[in-house]
């Protein structure tokens, strides 16, 4: 009898190991918090570098807009592939929804930073940290219910509907 070796299925193994890692870190909430930390770090790096590079030549609110755009482009794959797996929209549609939610953070920054920086005298990065902390819970709900919604099957029939639950863990 000749034994043959089954060729490995690297795609399935890769997906399985990614799920195992995510489960080990506590699932959805941890991946969302990690995504938030990643987003804040990327945003702060771009904002700080921009503020240091352009100092008083470019207003800080322009740097906020540019940093926001670059950050959203860079972190979308993390949210799509890790945090909100199972989203039903295509990548471009999902990105537009993701950026729409990101715009709420941008509007919060554009409205709140002048108050905190100009009137309260806080440094830009400290004021921005405060505004991010305030907006995180609101953004999470909007991401979960709208930007990365998942179709679910109602228990009473086979009619798909859009629900707020992203994953079934």
Image (cartoon, rainbow, N blue to C red):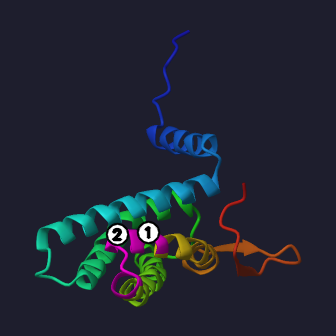
> Residue 143's quadrant in the figure?
bottom right
Q: In this rendering, is residue 20 above or below 148?
A: above
Magenta: main secondary structure equals helix
Q: Residues within 10 Å of mark 2 (few under 14, many from 20)?
A: some
Which residue appears at 79% of the width and 77% of the height?
A: 158
Q: Nearer the viewer, residue 118 or 45?
A: 118
Q: Position of residue 17 (x, y in %)?
A: 53, 39
Q: Where is residue 60 in the image (x, y as percent from the top left)?
A: 24, 80
Query: Which residue is label 2 attached to?
Result: 125
Q: Which stretch did the figure color magenta?
A: 116-130
Looking at the rendered image, the quarter that the C terminus falls into is bottom right
Q: Do the residues labelled 2 and 1 touch (CB within 8 Å)?
A: yes
Q: Nearer the viewer, residue 29 or 131?
A: 131
> Residue 21's quadrant in the figure?
top right
Residue 165 is a magenta residue? no
Residue 118 is a magenta residue? yes
Query: Which residue is label 1 attached to?
Result: 129
Q: In this view, does 36 lie to the left or right of 122?
A: right
Looking at the rendered image, the quarter that the N terminus falls into is top right
Q: Position of residue 22 (x, y in %)?
A: 58, 46
Q: Is residue 16 left or right of residue 60?
A: right
What is the tally of numbered marks visible in this picture?
2
Rounded to the nearest angstrom, the CA distance separating label 2 from label 1 is 6 Å
Q: In this rendering, is residue 121 above or below 169?
A: below
Which residue appears at 20% of the width and 71% of the height?
A: 51
Which residue appears at 72% of the width and 59% of the height?
A: 168
Q: Where is residue 82 in the image (x, y as percent from the top left)?
A: 51, 56
Q: What element carries label 1?
A: helix
Which label is found at residue 154? none
Which residue appears at 64% of the width and 51% of the height?
A: 27
Q: What element carries label 2?
A: helix
């Amino acid at each position: 009898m000749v034994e043959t070796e089954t060729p490995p299925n690297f795609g399935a193994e890769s997906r399985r190991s990614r799920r195992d890692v995510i489960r080990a870190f506590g699932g959805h909430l941890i991946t969302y918090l990690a995504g938030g930390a990643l987003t804040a770090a990327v945003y702060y790096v771009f904002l700080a570098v921009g503020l240091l590079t352009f100092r008083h030549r470019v207003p800080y609110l322009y740097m906020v807009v540019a940093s926001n755009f670059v950050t959203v482009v860079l972190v979308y794959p993390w949210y799509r592939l890790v945090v909100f797996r199972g989203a039903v929209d295509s990548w471009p549609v999902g990105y537009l929804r993701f950026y729409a939610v990101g715009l709420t953070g941008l509007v919060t920054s554009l409205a709140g930073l002048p108050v905190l920086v100009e009137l309260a005298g806080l440094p830009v990065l400290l004021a921005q940290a405060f505004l991010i902390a305030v907006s995180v819970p609101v953004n999470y709900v909007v991401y979960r219910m709208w930007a990365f919604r998942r179709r679910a099957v109602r228990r009473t029939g086979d009619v798909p509907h859009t629900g707020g639950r992203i994953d079934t863990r």
